[in-house]
Amino acid sequence: MYFRSIPNLEYGTKPISYPFSDSDYVVAKNFFRRYRVNEDAFSYAVYFKRYAVLEGESIYQVAEKAYEDPMLDWVVVLTNGMVNPLFDWPMSSSELRKHCEANYNNPYGDISHYEVVEAYAESGIPILQEGLKVDETFYNSTYKYWDGTQVRSILGSSISRPVTVYENEETENEKKREIFILKPNYLTPFLDDFRKNNLYQKSSDFITTGLKRTGQ
């Protein structure tokens, strides 16, 4: 249905100055028209529900689970603003390992960055925000902080840790697992709106609601 709903674009195959005939045009899908879900919609829990993609689960399987139709995988893609599902969808553990080993010399040993771990002063005040990225200089030096009564010093290595390339990639991959699923009750209105937004309006290059010409 997705490709059927995308309108066509008829474009010239010869220089603009060349006298055209109908045979000088090629018809192709107009993928430059991108349907976007209003970001405000995600603030309304009535339309969407959060879903955590399971290990190794594909977009087709999620669509089958949500709408009983794996061919509606594109609805999952569009409602989550994915540009390229190949990169925007979470990889399985084995895929992630293969990706890291193919793209990095030593993903399990090389350091991506350093980050703050949970650390509190004796008074109970947080020293720094957990997960804050810091550099190697911070890790190897002394950090001074105010504990509410006086200035104290602490080793950077005691409140931060090195994060390997693989660990960083793994964290970023896990973030992709949380997606939005359009609730089945709102699927039909969504499909209708998608079709409507893919109809051309009358203009100088208009031919039909599903076809316009460019390159004249």
Image (tube, grey):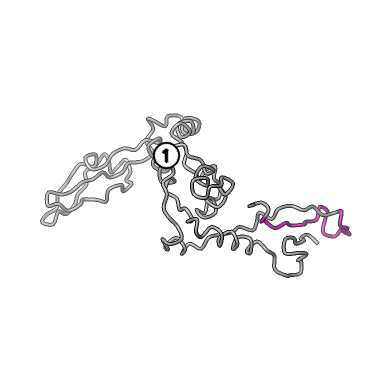
Label 1 sits on residue: 169
**40 inside magenta stretch:** no
In this picture, residue 61 sits left or right of residue 167: right
The boundaries of the magenta stretch are 5-23
Front-most of residues 67 and 160: 67
Q: Residue furthest left?
A: 149
The answer to which of 107 and 208 lies nearer the viewer is 208
Compared across the picture, whether 64 is left or right of 205 comes to left
Callout 1: helix, strand or loop? helix
Rendered image quadrant of residue 34? bottom right
- Residue 127: where, in percent of width, then height? 21, 50
On screen, residue 123 above or below 171: below
* Above or below, comparing residue 37 to residue 109 in the picture: below
Mark 1: which amino acid?
Glu
Question: Residue 171 at what x, y percent from top left?
Answer: 38, 42
Q: Which is nearer the eye, 106 or 145?
A: 106
